[in-house]
Image (cartoon, helix red, strand yellow):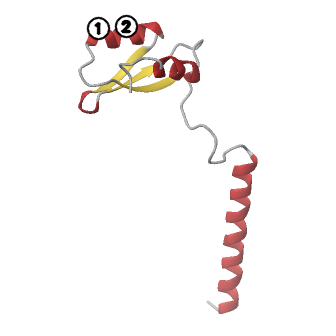
Amino acid sequence: MTVRRLNVIAILFLTVCLVLTTHSYSHGKSSKQKMFVQNEVLVRFVSGVSVSEKNTIRKSLRARKIKEIKSIRIEYWQLPPDISTDEALEFLRSQPSVE
């Protein structure tokens, strides 16, 4: 391959990268955008919280436990459609037994 041909390929590659980057930012995918899955939360409880207290908090949100990772005290919950992730996080932040 000639040097001229390599330069053309490099310019085309950089142009495509620039277009894709510009396209992503123009569609609201900036680094300041919230990154979460709607109607799902990961909850980490303080060490020593009882199962009944965890269940009480989860039932307050009418959430369903999908999975539990005991080694790091995290539960993966699915929220009902009428409770947003932001609403659930606001409630969970007010709970002393949730980190």
The residue at the point 42 percent across, 14 percent down is 64
Give the labeled residue for mark 2.
56
- Image coordinates of residue 32 in percent, x first then y, are 63, 44
Question: Where does the N terminus fall, quadrant-wise?
Answer: bottom right
Residue 74 at x, y = what percent?
Answer: 33, 28
Tag 1 secondary structure: helix
Residue 32 drawn above or below residue 47: below
Q: Secondary structure at mark 2?
A: helix
Tell me the quadrant of the picture where the C terminus can be found. Answer: top left
Write down the residue under mark 1: 52
The outermost residue toward the right is 26
Q: Residues within 10 Å of mark 1 (few under 14, many from 20)?
A: few
Quadrant of residue 2 within the rendered picture: bottom right
Please identify the quarter of the rendering in which residue 59 is found: top left
Q: Amino acid at mark 1?
A: Ser
Circles 2 and 1: CB distance less than 8 Å? yes
Q: Amino acid at mark 2?
A: Thr
In the depicted view, which residue is nearer to us: 55 or 40?
Answer: 55
What residue is rendered at 54% in x and 30% in y?
37
Residue at x 57%, y 18% (from the top left corner): 87
